[in-house]
Amino acid sequence: MISKMQRADRLFLCALLSFLLAGCATYPAAPPGVLPALKNIQTITVPQQDTLAVSTEMKRFVEKYVNRQQSPEQRLRLLTQAVVHPGMLGFEYDAGQTLTAQRAFEKGAGNCLAFTNMFIALAREAGLTAYYQDARVVPEWDEQNNAYLLAKHINVLVRLRSGDYVVDIGRRRVGESIDQHIVSDQYAKAQYYNNLGVEALLRNQIATAFGYFERALDADSGS
């Protein structure tokens, strides 16, 4: 069991690393500040979120646009078309929105993690085997008021008998990736909480940020 001080140390380290590992997002600028002493940190317990939960509307979407009687390859093609076509869902890339599958579907927009959450949830609802895939890309740094953010990237891998197919909403082409490998649902959930923590930290909402970092640590420990 982790002691309170050990956990505080881990949270502090998590906060520092998060500035370097902010996945698929750009964040609003915030006035530079100094992190409070660890002993003075009062965290807020943020609610747990099911990043892959499928709503009734999402189920209806799959039923409407994807014929489960067709081959997996055809289902993947139909689902991809339905998600990106302007006359259907028309999902749009928005680097500033880290969302669950349900919220990404409702808004029809989000960053690569939001899109990946949503697409994996829809793909599994359509009976496809879909995974999160960490895509190591050429480093892309962003400086915001003395904070340096290194964008990470994540996409979808759908495994079919005919081979593996990558579905990617980001600005980068798949060929730009240095390395890609499957990661667990829990790892992706940790990245989700990590992103929200970074956003809160840049808004100087320290207690909320560390609440999200706690969730990230808990999720990552199960990956």
Image (cartoon, rainbow, N blue to C red):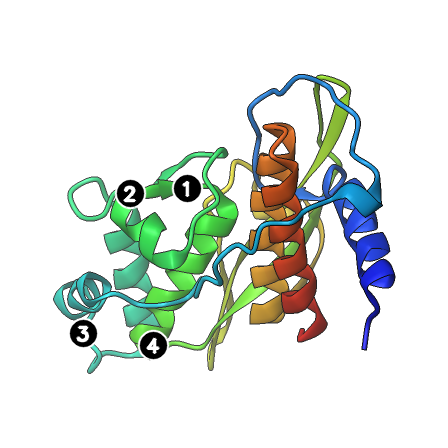
Report the front residue among 29 and 185: 29
Cβ atoms at labels 1 and 2 below 8 Å apart: yes
Cβ atoms at labels 1 and 4 below 8 Å apart: no
Q: CA distance from mark 1 to mark 3?
A: 26 Å
Residue at mark 2? 107
Where is residue 184 shown, x and y percent of the image? 61, 71
Three-letter code, disc 3: Asn
Q: Quadrant of the C terminus?
A: bottom right
Report the front residue among 64 and 26: 26
Please say whether residue 91 is visible from this viewpoint: no
Please say whether residue 132 is visible from this viewpoint: yes
Horizontal placement of 29 versus 101: left or right? right
Q: CA distance from mark 1 to mark 2?
A: 8 Å
Residue at mark 3? 67
Numbered disc in front, either 3 or 2: 2
137 relative to 82, above or below: above
Three-letter code, disc 1: Gly
Q: Residue at x 24, y 54 (%)?
A: 82
Residue at mark 4? 72
Numbered disc in front, either 1 or 4: 1
Q: CA distance from mark 3 to mark 4?
A: 10 Å
